[in-house]
Image (cartoon, grey):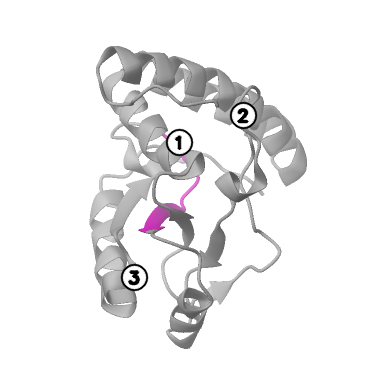
Amino acid sequence: MIVIYAYQPTWPREFDSIKTALSNILGTQALQIDHIGSTSVPGLGAKDVIDIQVTVSALTPDIPQMLTAAGYQYRQDITCDHVPLGANNTPNLWKKQFFHQPEGQRRAHIHVRVKGNPNQQYALLFRDYLRTHPNSAQSIELIKREIAKRHGDDIDAYYDIKDPVYDLVWEAAQAWALHSHRLKPENNS
């Protein structure tokens, strides 16, 4: 059942704890570890799952080996992200490795993505846009609450509706980033 909770001020501290563990496990493989998703936006209600992005230079087999040895659950069935309409849909640009927390630990989703790929940039830009646009963040929360109310027991329906809404925010976030010099124009050649 999908439930959207009010923002919890403990979420950033919980992220910090998981980040420390991941950093100790992955060492220099992790170029950066970021709190992403709705729990990373102050004041934004969300599912009670800490989303974390681990940025790497390449998706290599040793990353799943290190994380599974530490108890993380590797979801080999999740290999890529949703591609927003109009984005470059080259499959390698949207690949990722995905993990759940070790059994008995705080719920977390670990997304391992390649530095510079659009899916890696999407997560950071989306977060930063919502952090600086509180009305958009509140609209996202309202939409998620309404979807959960109507489709809380149907994860596919939830994402079938949520993804296109997020694509709209992605368009606005890209324009904002270009205007504020946070993003370089994409080379489509």
Q: Nearer the viewer, residue 64 or 56?
A: 56
Q: Amino acid at mark 1?
A: Tyr
How far apart, in angstroms, are the residues tagged by discs 2 and 3?
28 Å
Q: Secondary structure at mark 1?
A: helix
Q: Which residues are magenta?
A: 45-55
3D distance between C-alphas at marks 1 and 3: 21 Å
Residue drawn at point x = 60 percent, y = 22 percent = 165
Residue located at (28% from left, 64% from top): 19
Please state if 133 lies on the left or on the right of 101 as rendered: left
What secondary structure is found at the residue carrying circle 2?
A: loop
Residue 135, image x, y percentages: 37, 14
In the rendered structure, find residue 84 and report the number of the disc placed on it.
2
Q: Which type of secondary structure does the marked residue at label 3 adopt?
A: helix
The correct choice, above or below, for 64 with respect to 12 in the image is below
The three-letter amino acid code for the residue at tag 3 is Gln
Query: Residue most toward the front?
Result: 189
Kindly identify which numbered label has been placed on residue 29. 3
Position of 155 with respect to 115 (left or right) is right
Q: Point out the tag, 1 or 3, that comes first from the N-terminus.
A: 3
Residue at 42% x, 35% y is: 45
Q: According to the image, label 1 marks what residue? A: 122
Q: Earlier in the sequence, mark 1 or mark 2?
A: 2
Q: Nearer the viewer, residue 49 or 53?
A: 53
